[in-house]
Amino acid sequence: MNNTQSDNNLFYFNRLTYITPHEVALAMNGFDYDTENDELTEIQLKEVIRLRKAITRNLQLINEYKNISATQKVEANLVLTAAYIFQREDIVPVEIKERIENALQQQVKNKDW
């Protein structure tokens, strides 16, 4: 049985333990998390950069990550939780929404929030 490229991309994305804000921004915009910037149009790249900046700023609210950059790997559930508020109904794929929701639930459970 052949998997589609999209299924393969989600397989890996859903199992990453560390991820960057940039990779999450790509996935939230419907791209493979491993997409190179030069594979995107100027408009697509601008939106990915805008989202990754927002996610990074949320991470920077935590003292431990105040100097984090958009391309640094961070524990996946933390990055996905930082991205939660930026989900857009018309853009974020359902599978990515589910992964973000799962990450938030894990953070609440593990961090005793």
Image: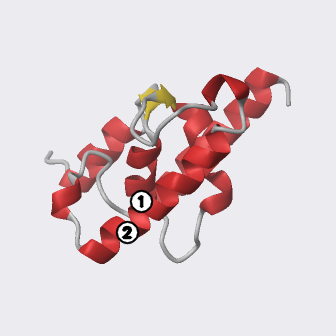
| Residue kind at label 2, given as amino acid type | Lys
Residue nearest the viewer, comparing 43 with 24: 43
Mark 1 nearby-residue class (10 Å; few <14, some 14–19, many ≥20)? some
In percent of the image, x 53 and y 33: which residue is there?
68
Number of marks? 2
Residue 47, position as x, y percentages in the image: 42, 69
Disc 2: which residue: 46
Residue 94, position as x, y percentages in the image: 50, 61
Q: CA distance from mark 1 to mark 2?
A: 5 Å
Q: Is residue 61 left or right of residue 18?
A: right
Vertically, is 77 above or below 38?
above
Element carrying mark 2? helix
In percent of the image, x 56 and y 45: which residue is there?
56
In percent of the image, x 43 and y 29: which residue is there?
73
| Quadrant hosting residue 64 | top right
Q: Residue furthest right?
A: 113
Element carrying mark 1? helix
Residue 29, position as x, y percentages in the image: 41, 64
For residue 108, the mark is none
Q: Is residue 64 visible?
A: yes
Vertically, is 103 above or below 30?
above
Disc 1: which residue: 49
| Residue kind at label 1, given as amino acid type | Ile
In percent of the image, x 72 and y 38: which residue is there?
61
Label 1 with label 2: CB-CB less than 8 Å: yes
